Amino acid sequence: MSHALIAVDGVLRKLVGGAPIPEGIRLYRSLRSTGQVILLINEDGHEQVLEWLELHGCIGHGFVARADWNDRVGQVNALRREGYDIDLVVVADPEQAKLLIDSGLNTLLFTHARYTQPSWRPDSPSGVQPWDDITKQVADLARMKAADERLRSDD
């Protein structure tokens, strides 16, 4: 029987904060209804991930495969050596997707609509603005408003 592998982080839950990604969970349920699913997680926080999966109704998979985050290809190849017929791997990281495709695996790159514009991506050149810069801008705007003569008139 063929298996679909799904990375938990970035597909089922957000990397920052761990909130569920509804579209990823729907994809999980769809693949689970048509075949066997194996979830891919990192070595770190195994028990917390299992608890998160149960809490969010992701309980119909065969098992959870743990490995180093940076070695998805090795993780998949280890499962293949154990006799698992892997016909699809779902990941959210474009670099991992490229490596999986290069190694001959059918790969689905899960990209959430929030990141379709390069400027919206967390790794964009503009990046996330530091909190100190934001507070400085707010203080500068408050000083400019206080110094505006038009706002001081009693008319």
Image (spheres, rainbow, N blue to C red):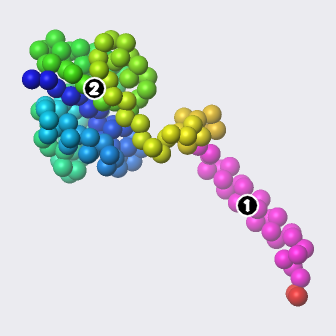
Looking at the picture, how far across and down is residue 33, in whole percent?
A: 14, 40
Viewer-side residue, 34 vs 18? 34
Seen from this angle, which residue lies furthest left?
A: 1
Give the image quarter of residue 9. top left
User: In the shown orientation, is residue 144 left or right of residue 131?
Assistant: right
Seen from this angle, which residue lies furthest bottom?
A: 155
Type of secondary structure dominating the magenta stretch? helix
Which image quarter is the C terminus in? bottom right
User: In the shown orientation, is residue 111 left or right of residue 152?
Assistant: left
Q: Which mark is residue 139?
A: 1
Note whether 151 is above or below 32 in the view shown.
below
Return the disc, 2 or 1, that comes first in the chain's sequence: 2
Q: Residue at x 20, y 43 (%)?
A: 29
Which image quarter is the N terminus in? top left
Q: Which mark is residue 89?
A: 2
Q: What span is in magenta?
A: 128-153
Secondary structure under badge 2? strand
Note whether 100 is above or below 152 in the view shown.
above
Note whether 118 is above or below 19 in the view shown.
above
User: In the shown orientation, is residue 113 left or right of residue 23?
Assistant: right
**Tag 2: amino acid:** Val
Q: Residue at x 31, y 49 (%)?
A: 22
Reply yes or no: does residue 13 show up in magenta: no
- Indicate which label's residue lies in the foreground, 2 or 1: 2
The CA span between labels 2 and 1 is: 48 Å
User: In the shown orientation, is residue 120 left or right of residue 96?
Assistant: right
Looking at the picture, how far across and down is residue 65, in whole percent?
A: 20, 27
Q: Residue at x 48, y 45 (%)?
A: 114
Looking at the picture, how far across and down is residue 123, in whole percent?
A: 54, 34
Looking at the picture, how far across and down is residue 128, in whole percent?
A: 59, 43
